[in-house]
Amino acid sequence: MKLEKIGRDIVVILLGTAIYAFGLVFVNIPNQLAEGGVTGITLIFRALFGINPALSTLLLNIPIIALGGRILGRRSFFYTIIGTLSLSAWLFVWQKVNFSIDLDHDLLIAALVAGLFGGVGSGIIYRVGGTTGGSDVIARILEQKIGVSVGRTLFILDIVILTASLTYIDLKRMMYTLIFSYVFAHIVDAILDGGYSARGVLVISNHSQAIAPQLMAEMERGVSFLNGEGAYSGGEKKIIYMVVSAREVSEVKRIVHEYDSTAFVSIINVHEVEGEGFTYLKPKKKLFGKKKAS
């Protein structure tokens, strides 16, 4: 099972690097949009010295990965090597393909499309615990050696590299690069958050024992009781907890308020759900009638 999971992760990393490299070759480079991190350095080398990004990606990452080998851990180290090699390979392959994306010289659309490809590619790589090396590894090294946080290091590196990118792009394109970076970051976050909009619901009521079976029957979701105590009354309470989609929240409120109009209902953003009884995917409904609660 472990080898099967590793195999699936490698396939995902290969797919993610293919998507990321595709956007870089067919959107970023033709429209002169910069990037942060080591990828941004490869674009600078390409513009100023004519060095192929496929080659510079490999040459820049080899010493970085070698330095960070002990820090990354065995699994992350292996996945980083796979990500770096596959990114370099895909950059080489895509540059050999006779293909172009006609965006009618619209830099805004180019920035949005580049952010889409880059965000989706990187997001699915990060989701399985992979990286493409570069600034992520540098940030981890500095965090361990001198105590600088990963986020701060990545931020500083991106500022330095994007500023250096002004050597080959103008200020106008730099502004569109910032739009690209914004879209990129939000898509990565959406993919890492699970790609769905889930809500956790906490219900505090004196009628929890009656409400819970009805929620299970009508919503077809798992429900758990949390033991609570009223700070003012000192009385014990059964607190209902369940996870639903964003569009189902209003239905949950309706069911709760049918039994207790004074019930306290708290809605919480949920980024990911795992474990028995909390499967996010809703069971398929029967053709006729609703599924009965067990």
Image (cartoon, rainbow, N blue to C red):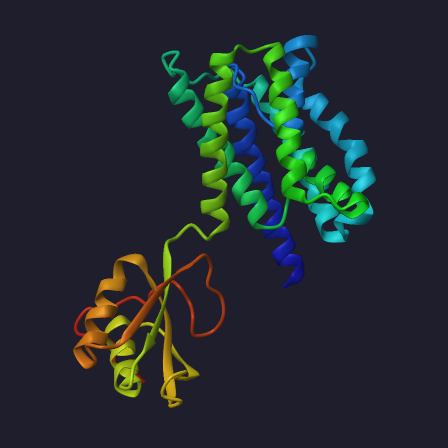
Q: How many marks?
A: 0
User: Residue 200: x percent and y percent?
Assistant: 38, 65
Q: Nearer the viewer, residue 261 or 9?
A: 261
User: Residue 132: x percent and y percent?
Assistant: 65, 37
Q: Is residue 58 left or right of residue 155?
A: right
Q: Nearer the viewer, residue 163 or 83?
A: 163
Q: Is residue 3 left or right of residue 125?
A: right
Q: Is residue 161 left or right of residue 208?
A: right
User: Residue 191: x percent and y percent?
Assistant: 47, 46
Q: Quadrant of the C terminus?
A: bottom left
Res. 27 visible in picture: no
Res. 166 visible in picture: yes
Is 271 situated above or below 72? below
Q: Residue furthest front?
A: 232
Is 87 situated above or below 141? above
User: Residue 195: x percent and y percent?
Assistant: 42, 50
Q: Nearer the viewer, residue 11 or 272?
A: 272
Q: Residue furthest bottom?
A: 235
Residue at horizontal 61 percent and vertical 26 percent from the top: 159
Residue at horizontal 29 percent and vertical 74 percent from the top: 264
Residue at horizontal 79 percent and vertical 43 percent from the top: 146
Residue at horizontal 47 percent and vertical 52 percent from the top: 193
Is 145 situated above or below 255? above
